[in-house]
Image (spheres, rainbow, N blue to C red):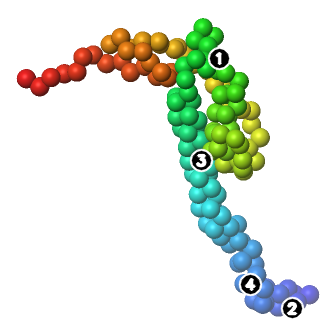
Amino acid sequence: MIRLARKLIRDESAAAAAELVLALPLLLVLIWGPIEIGNYFLDEHMLIKGVRDGATFLAHQDISKFNCATGAVDPTVRTQVENVIRTGQVSGGVDRLRNWAGNPPTITVDRCPTQATNGTTLGGIYAFRWASPRRAT
């Protein structure tokens, strides 16, 4: 029995397989970690781009499509903005993000100024407020 135990201890025929089993988790992390981090940053970029596109689309809408008293947006414009955020197209299409199953974004208007400080009538939801232009002296 002792002779058999010594023979098994000296046997190195499966040493490479044992080392692979010990190193495999670290190798998988080194291979798949950067791929998953890249996917995360791509998804984050696509989400930010979608929100930016939706805000730009909403800013170009006529002020009559907003209810300044309640902050509500016309339902047609709301659907179009949600489509722009989700797909990048006004009419809808393929989602920017895989497995997009979340609730639609909340769209509200804080305030709707009808005139800028210089007396001009505004046509969108953004008010450009500035003092008179500075002149070089």
Under circle 1, the secondary element is strand
Tell me the kind of residue under disc 4: Ala
Q: Give the label, 3 or 4, closer to the camera.
A: 3
Asked if residue 49 is positioned above or below residue 75 in the image, the reply reads below
Q: Which residue is mark 1?
A: 72
Crowd tier of the residue under label 4, counting other residues whose Cα lies within 10 Å: few below 14, some 14–19, many 20 or above:
few
Estimate how packed mark 2 is, as few (under 14), some (14 to 19) or many (20 or more) residues with alpha carbons within 10 Å. few
Q: Does label 3 or label 4 sit earlier along the sequence? A: 4
Quick one: quadrant of the C terminus?
top left
The amino acid beneath tag 1 is: Ala
| First of labels 2, 4 by sequence position | 2
Q: Which of the numbered marks, if any, corresponds to residue 15?
A: 4
Give how far apart the Cα atoms at labels 3 and 4 are. 47 Å
Q: Position of residue 130 (x, y in %)?
A: 31, 18
Going by the image, does 106 lie left or right of 133? Answer: right
Residues at marks 3 and 2, CA–CA distance in whole angstroms: 66 Å
**In the rendered image, which residue does mark 3 sit on?**
46
Q: Secondary structure at mark 3?
A: helix
The residue indicated by pointer 2 is 3
